[in-house]
Amino acid sequence: MIEDPAAAEASLDPMRSRLLAELVQPGSATTLAAKVGLARQKVNYHLRTLEKYGLVELVEERKKGNVTERVMQATAASFVISPVALDAVAPDPGRSPDRLSAGWLLALAAQLVRDVGALITGAAKARKRVATFAIAGEVRFASVADRAAFAEELADAVTRLVSKYHDEDAEGGRDHRVIVAVHPAVKKER
């Protein structure tokens, strides 16, 4: 999870992004230069920037004559830029709570990324897992009326479940956020 605006900017550079993808497996500036078609010195420059922001780390140093080859690896298999990186302009679900608004859905998704990112970071430091549950699927509606009826039934079912299991006075209980979203599926280009 990238929360630092400068780290986000560094990771969005197309070459650095490509190097991060290559560094899922350890590599040196020399091996990376051959893969990405850049001079070793340029690759080293990008690696130092990525290392500065904790996106890559040193895993090994190899001596070759008078030269020390640094073998680097990405600090994660994948990265997500948190809305925290753009905190001043990040969407806020509290600004316009309209459950039929795409803007509100986007704000909820941003909040989800922020919250789960913070949970993952904290759990990693504590060497624990985060208790989560997610479900995803697709449904094809025959009409706008069917979509509206589905949304209403879904809202009723979730409200019923929340009412059944929510215990405001549970000693030692832990609050959980429930987000359910329905949006048109985006067709993947082939």
Image (tube, rainbow, N blue to C red):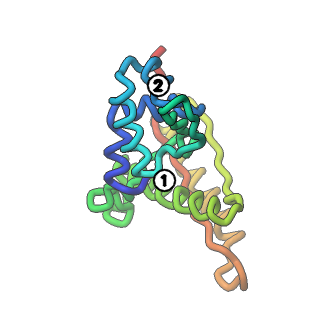
Query: Which residue is nearer to you in this view: 57 or 77?
Result: 57
| Tag of residue 113 | 1
Amino acid, disc 2: Thr
Task: Estimate the spatial distance between the alpha carbons at disc 1 and disc 2, rounded to whole Å.
Answer: 36 Å
Query: Which residue is nearer to you in this view: 150 or 49?
Result: 49
Name, please, the residue furthest toward the left: 89
| Tag of residue 56 | none
* Residue to which mark 2 is pinned: 30
Under circle 2, the secondary element is: helix
Amino acid, disc 1: Val
Crowdedness near tag 1: few (<14), some (14–19) or many (≥20) residues, C-alpha within 10 Å = some
Residue 45 found in image quarter:
top left
Q: Is residue 105 in view? A: no
Residue drawn 45% across and 18% down?
Answer: 34
Name, please, the residue furthest toward the top: 190
Q: Is residue 9 in view? A: yes
Residue drawn 71% across and 61% down?
Answer: 128
